[in-house]
């Protein structure tokens, strides 16, 4: 069995950004002050010149540069919200704001952007529109994931079975514009930075496996960027959880628990919060169970709270745990950066998923032999390795892949670069009645197998994190 590649891997420590559109000229007072703090006005002038020419800003003495940017993507007026395939439900109020959050990292000849969107999923066709608006970073190094909130507008444009679709195309284009603005803001705000990275089990009533309560990954990965002056630039949390406390049937547009998590991080650290989901498929969900109200004691199902207050409780608990976990981590003052992208071709066996691919007005690329192409990234940053996953991997896949990765800390970004449903191994595919839905909304039996093969090949053939 071989994962078919459709083009050559790109290893981005040997590439620089393509020529960009000219930026506005003229040195700003802010740039002068930043330059003076980093080593003189000459540095600020050089930085402004690099921006005007569209290339990455040169760091003094090869230092790492990090920047953060954010945009609000809440629709105004509100749109129906989607919990997945099927018709979205009307919304009549909002709680919090949907956001696009971008983290930019530059070191030497390598630049990357990591973007988190408060959406249920963000297809590659839309991600490519974002990348086209950010020519200062190689397109394959712009890594875009969705938080998977079930209380935001559909960005798939699912076919509705009547010749139409479920999405608002103008809103999708607006999200693409704002996500690109967030990345460009992060690039322009970049400054010398060090990293703090840590992993530990998150404590508290946060998540559980709805199908088998104790089978889930309790580990939370945290990456924090700190400026030379000791101020937090951003805190990235990587954790497996379905943000579906509110869901799509309460008429509320919201980021679910992720909004309160980011708000709490920003309140307590001063830097931007950003969330990248992990292997939350089958079915790692928010633990808003009312434990003294069992719905089916024999099968271990409970009634849920399902309130915005519960989103706040879980989100703030996650943020506090992230701060606890990363707090004692040492500064990585000379962290290296490596980024690689590769493609894998996957058969589409599910009739439902093939209908989404072929009938959506977004015009997903696909092949006549019922296959699609998915992009995967491997990133080494400091002592940490990151892999991306184009969907919702079951937790056993997440555990296995992390065990085979070669970082001191291993992150898995789920629902990233695409969102092709659930990802199962062939031994889990249609194995239990409980797995019927996740199997039907998977590309097919070999999806997990092909992705695991590609991930392991990339890990084996890439440098070990420094």
Image (cartoon, rainbow, N blue to C red):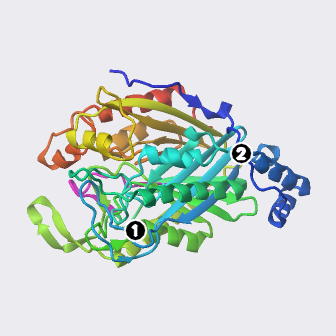
What residue is at 15 percent from the left and 39 percent from the top?
431
Q: Is residue 214 left or right of residue 337?
A: left
What residue is at 37 percent from the left and 71 percent from the top?
253
What residue is at 44 percent from the left and 44 percent from the top?
125
Name above or below for residue 392 compared with residue 37: above
Name above or below for residue 126 compared with residue 118: above
Quadrant of the rendered structure where residue 306 is? bottom left
Q: Residue furthest top?
A: 1
For the question of whether residue 410 can be seen, the reply is no
Identify the residue under disc 2: 334
Disc number placed over residue 257 in the picture, else none: 1
Which is in the foreground here, disc 1 or disc 2? 1
Q: Position of residue 41 (x, y in %)?
A: 90, 57
Quadrant for the N terminus in the image: top left
Quadrant of the rendered structure where residue 370 is? top left
Q: Nearer the viewer, residue 35 or 182?
A: 182
Name above or below for residue 106 compared with residue 367: below
Say whether disc 1 or disc 2 marks the residue closer to the N-terminus: 1
Q: Which residues are magenta?
A: 207-224
Quadrant of the rendered structure where residue 80 is? bottom left
| Residue neighbourhood size for the residue with mark 1, other residues' Cα within 10 Å, grouped as few (<14), some (14–19), many (≥20) | many
Q: Nearer the viewer, residue 435 or 141?
A: 141
| Residue neighbourhood size for the residue with mark 2, other residues' Cα within 10 Å, grouped as few (<14), some (14–19), many (≥20) | some
Q: Is residue 27 left or right of residue 277?
A: right
Q: Secondary structure at mark 2?
A: loop
For the question of whether residue 231 can be seen, the reply is yes
Q: Does the magenta segment cover residue 112?
A: no
Q: Position of residue 360 (x, y in %)?
A: 33, 46
Q: CA distance from mark 1 to mark 2?
A: 34 Å
Q: Nearer the viewer, residue 353 or 196?
A: 353
């Amino acid at each position: 069995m071989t994962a078919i590649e459709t083009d050559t891997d790109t290893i981005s420590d040997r590439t620089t950004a393509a020529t960009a559109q000219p930026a506005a000229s003229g040195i700003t007072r802010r740039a002068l002050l930043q330059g003076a703090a980093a080593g003189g006005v000459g540095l600020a002038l050089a930085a402004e010149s690099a921006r005007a020419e569209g290339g990455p800003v040169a760091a003094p003495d090869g230092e790492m540069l990090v920047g953060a940017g954010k945009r609000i993507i809440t629709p105004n007026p509100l749109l129906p919200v989607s919990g997945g395939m099927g018709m979205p439900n009307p919304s009549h109020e909002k709680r919090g704001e949907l956001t696009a959050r971008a983290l930019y990292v530059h070191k030497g000849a390598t630049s990357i952007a990591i973007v988190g969107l408060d959406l249920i999923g963000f297809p590659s066709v839309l991600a490519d529109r974002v990348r086209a608006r950010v020519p200062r970073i190689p397109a394959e190094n712009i890594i875009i994931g969705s938080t998977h909130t079930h209380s935001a507008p559909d960005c798939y444009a699912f076919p509705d079975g009547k010749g139409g679709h479920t999405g608002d195309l103008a809103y999708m284009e607006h999200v693409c514009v704002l996500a690109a603005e967030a990345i460009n803001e992060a690039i322009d705000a970049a400054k010398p930075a060090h990293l703090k990275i840590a992993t530990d089990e998150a404590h508290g009533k946060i998540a559980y496996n709805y199908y088998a309560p104790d089978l889930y990954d309790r580990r939370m990965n945290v990456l924090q960027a700190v400026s030379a002056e000791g101020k937090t630039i951003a805190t990235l949390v990587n954790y497996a959880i379905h943000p579906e406390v509110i869901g799509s049937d309460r008429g509320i547009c919201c980021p679910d628990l992720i909004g309160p998590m980011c708000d709490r991080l920003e309140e307590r650290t001063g830097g931007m919060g950003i969330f990248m989901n992990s292997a939350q498929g089958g079915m790692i969900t928010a633990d808003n169970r009312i434990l003294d109200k069992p719905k089916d004691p024999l099968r271990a199902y409970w009634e849920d709270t399902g309130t915005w207050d519960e989103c706040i409780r879980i989100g703030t608990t996650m943020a506090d745990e992230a701060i606890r976990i990363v707090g004692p981590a040492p500064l990585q003052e000379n962290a290296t950066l490596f980024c690689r992208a590769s493609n894998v071709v996957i058969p589409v066996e599910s009739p439902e998923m093939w209908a989404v691919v072929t009938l959506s007005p977004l015009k997903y690329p696909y092949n006549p032999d019922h296959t699609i192409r998915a992009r995967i990234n491997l990133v080494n940053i400091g002592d940490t390795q990151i892999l991306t996953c184009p969907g919702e991997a079951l937790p056993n896949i997440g555990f296995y892949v992390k065990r085979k990765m070669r970082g001191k800390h291993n992150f898995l970004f789920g629902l990233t670069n695409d969102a092709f449903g659930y990802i199962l191994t062939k031994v889990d595919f249609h194995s239990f009645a409980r797995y019927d839905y996740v199997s039907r909304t998977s590309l097919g039996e070999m999806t997990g197998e092909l992705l695991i093969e590609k991930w392991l090949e990339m890990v084996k053939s890439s440098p070990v994190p420094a």
